[in-house]
Image (cartoon, rainbow, N blue to C red):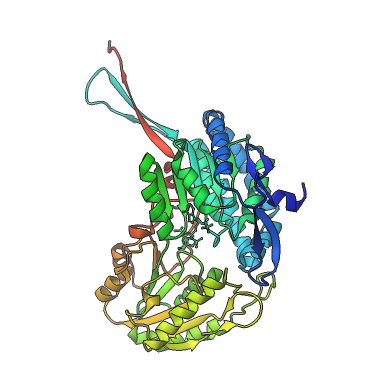
Amino acid sequence: MTFQELTQSIYINGSWEPIDTDQVETIYNPATLEEITKVAYGGADETKRAIKAATDAFPLWSEMTGRERGKVLYKAHELMMERVDYLAEVLTTEQGKPLAEAKGEVTSAAQFLLWYAEEASRAYGEVIPSATKGKRMLVIPQPVGVVGAITPWNFPSSMITRKLGPALAAGCTAVLKPAPETPLSAIEIFKIFAEAGMPKGVINLVTGDAKAIGQTLLESKDVKMITFTGSTAVGKYLMRESANHVKKISLELGGHAPIIVYDDADIDKATSMSLASKFRNNGQTCVCANRIYVHENIIDEFTTMLKEKVNKLKVGSGLDANSDIGPLINEQAIAKVKSQLEDAASKGGEIVTGGNAIEGAGHFFEPTIVAGATDEMVMMNEETFGPLMPIQTFTDEDAVIAKANDTDYGLAAYVFTENLSKAVRTAERLEYGLVGVNEIALAAPEAPFGGIKQSGVGKEGGHHGMDEFLEKKYVAIGIDEK
Ligand code: NAP
């Protein structure tokens, strides 16, 4: 099969099938705006066939032992690691992030497969001591069934394995809809799964019309669970619609992460980590710093050091080894950054560095710091998803924690301090699913990742991530005691 034939097909029941319509979607490189390829634009019919394949494959896959399922996941992990350079190049070409970051993401994606390959053998149940004689009580974990998985473009590789890894380990089968901007990483991952010996129908890939695919997944009684990563608005819609069949749901949604830097923080560490948190993936990360609160006593030193470091960042094509920051995903992303910046400037914000879109092909924007941020500014209340870093000063611990919590989002928050008591107090009082203390790298295959409030429900990663895909069946056994 040529690459073009492959991308214009969908993966159903173990084979790449050309779609029934002649509709295709063009995929562009956000660094050059050049066409990369065309991808199949599937809809309701393709999704129904994919659901049927996943439903038919469920008995076989769910009845295999965890060890047998783990072997397929382990092989897929090995193949991903063998191809890490190629997969990173595909990811950078369609998504834009620098190659080093893309390689890090593919490695992390493969690590999820490795971890869940091992975890597949560890879906433990429980034996409950009965309060009455003549009874034995068991809790048996069993896979939920067919899962509909929907992923975003900002992590085109790791968001897929973070869902499919635990789902498959648990014994579920799946239909995946990747983001329209970044289907190529998904196609490569499915090629790998096929080579790794995944039985036909266990995983199915439908690219195309989000609404039609989503609606078909939601309306099908055979789909027992929806797992989604993306915006809070779409997450709420999926949650509402899932109610019709009372489907299980796991949602990883938007964030609006605060960083609190106390005056006893290691400023070198706090500036480097704030920079890494904000500008990784060009600010297009759900857990990235969206607003920085810095203690008044250290604001000058912090801002000067941060500015020096930010000014060294090189913006350019992710395929260029010298680039630290790639393009934004599309024109709307640039427009959002511009509009938040204009709003901040009109309300007295001071641009410390950056502030401009970069002329030429590609969606490039300078990494930007805004000092004097106030609570009224849009960027202090909404997810930016771009390279804009607002800084506000504070003096009081209680007041800054209250501000950090004053949002409907609850995904990630960070605190920098060398004072252990202050670190523990703050971490415990922050209303977030994830808290970094002198640390910004939060995602790991072995740890539960997920938001609270309107940032989501459920966890991905760790044994908690596999629990999402398991029902706990209670079996009561009456026996004749001697
Ligand atoms: P999005 O617009 O919500 O899209 C996410 C996915 O949902 C895409 O594949 C999209 O396809 C699909 N979709 C949209 N409407 C749908 C519908 N009615 N039915 C079914 N699928 C539908 O989000 P995004 O802009 O791609 O991603 C950025 C957002 O994701 C940010 O808010 C970010 O914070 C969040 N995110 C969260 C996490 C986390 O772990 N909490 C991780 C990464 C990203 P179309 O584009 O074709 O509509």
Q: Is residue 182 left or right of residue 371?
A: right
Residue 256 visible in the current orientation: yes
Q: Residue at horizontal 45%, vertical 46%? A: 226
Q: Residue at x 45, y 44 (%)?
A: 218
Q: Is residue 399 above or below residue 22?
A: below
For residue 442, above or below residue 318:
above
Residue lying furthest right: 2
> How many marks can you see?
0
The residue located at (33%, 68%) in the rendering is 423
For this view, does 29 lie left or right of residue 63?
Answer: right
Q: Quadrant of the C terminus?
A: top left
Residue 310 is drawn in which quadrant?
A: bottom right
From the top left corner, tell me how far across and down residue 426 is, in percent: 31, 68
Location of residue 261 (image quadrant) = bottom left
**Residue depicted at x 64% and y 43%:** 11
Snapshot quadrant of residue 287: bottom left
254 or 64: nearer the viewer: 254
Residue furthest out toward the top: 482
Vertical side of 29 occupied by 20: above or below:
above
Residue most extreme to the left: 132
Is 465 drawn above or below residue 420 in the view shown? Answer: above
Residue 304: x and y in percent read 47, 88
Q: Where does the image place residue 140, in percent across and percent down from the top left?
A: 40, 30
Q: Report whether residue 458 is seen.
A: no
Rendering coords of residue 119 (x, y %):
51, 41
